[in-house]
Amino acid sequence: MTGPLGLAAESSKDSVRKALPTGLFGGNDDVRVAVVGLRSRGRNHYNALQQIEGVEVVALCDVDRNILSERARDFNEQYDREVDMEVDFRRLLDRDDIHAVSLATPNHWHALQTIWACDAGKDVYVEKPVCHDMREGMAMVEAAHRNDRVVQTGTQYRSCTANQAAIEWARNGNLGEIKVARGICYKPRRSIGKVKGAQVVPDHIDYDLWVGPAPMKPLSRKNLHYDWHWDFDTGNGDLGNQGVHQMDIARWMIGAKGMPPRVMSAGGRVGYEDDGNTPNTQVVVLDYPDVPLIFEVRGLPRDASARQDKWQMDNYLGSGITAILHCEGGNVVTRHGANAAIVQDPDGREILRFTGTRNHFLDFIEAVRNNDRGNLAAEINEGRLSAALCHAGNASYRIGNKADRKEILGQVSGHEFGHDAMDRMLKHLAANEIDVNQPCLSAGPWLQIDPSTEQFDVAEANVLVSPSARAPYTHELLR
């Protein structure tokens, strides 16, 4: 059986990577890594990697020279040695002494940097979501496999042994029939503000490099950094930011190896008006025929009214719930950062707990050392598929029309779990003083998905998940 990439469904497990040059990692040789994108997550990357025995972070890279110099100074002080600094990622690819790159750049750069690195013979650790659109994800898998490279996705919950054990336990039938999987991203997001006109990009930032393959436009928000998540040109909203972690766990819970036959989403950016264009409130219904997957994004600030939701937004935030597998005899609940998965009875009482985790970066390094991508906890095809579910949900949302409560619920009439999620979302918004009886959200159509090509039945949706890249920041696999 082959998928849309022409690859066997289980090829990553059976693949044997070509041998590296003799002696490259023999004896006491270090795995030498460059970390790219340093403002936020990249700092975690270089600290985690540098603390693994036999790993040496040899270069740091960022298009913001101030951040680059600040992080390099901190690194040098902490590890008592000089690390190389680079602004342009492409210069790292020419260095034979760099074996792998670890990417914590914005979403719109992930695919191209991964593909370039694979072509240059480097192994790659790439942050979530691995791709900015569906076509990019497929190209990344092709680049990794044709170059026989190790590419690990930064969905670290895949290395949580508690999740592994609990999911296997439930799928073995210990809680009876599996009904539905639910991904949860309840994370308050404040307004990013609203500016008048184009903003000045500081001289210490190479803006052309920062934009890269995205459309070149003037900066039209207060902050260049981080708030790119809320612009569809460079980010994917919280569905593809924090949410892709939970999407990955929920897909893992039901054992889905491909796309569902159809998807529908409704949501909006409500509660404030700012320069973001991604939804802060959203429900996605991924209609797998055996076990549907429902995803919920809630981004309005915490307050008394938010707690009126049945699922108790504040309690979920406090306990860090990320995904729930609802079964006939109870639930399996995973928690953010807790390295624990909880089994509950139908009344929500804990009856069993699984604990334990592994170091996700160590999984990557061991795969690099052993020349074997088959043992990765989150091989690139896993990452691109979970990201594709997020992109599919956003595609339905983005081609939707403004709708009121009645129209939104009409879209999911007859779908038990989708209707329940939409209804609770609307009640949540009403409790936050959003008039849901007026057209307030975008309700997307049901998009049919061809499982062999992962194409939609609506051309407008296909354009959204396969946009063109800006020259020269492109690659033959992305054309």
Image: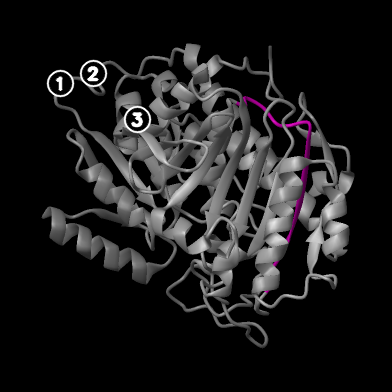
Q: Is residue 112 visible?
A: no
CB within 8 Å, label 2 to label 1: yes
User: Circle 1 sits on which residue?
Assistant: 27
Q: Earlier in the sequence, mark 1 or mark 3?
A: 1
Q: Which mark is residue 161?
A: 3
Residue range corresponding to the magenta coloring: 256-270
Q: Quadrant of the C terminus?
A: top right
Q: Is residue 226 magenta?
A: no
> Is residue 264 on the magenta stretch?
yes
Could you tell me residue 311's position as x and y percent?
56, 55
Quadrant of the rendering where the N terminus is positioned: top right
In the rendering, which numbered label is found on residue 23?
A: 2
Residue 167's place in the image compared with 102, above or below, is above
Q: Farthest residue to the bottom: give it.
A: 196
Q: To which quarter of the image does residue 459 belong?
A: top right
Q: Amino acid at mark 1?
A: Gly
Left or right position of 233 against 446: left
Q: Residue at x 46, y 40 (%)?
A: 333
Residue 185's place in the image compared with 389, above or below, is below
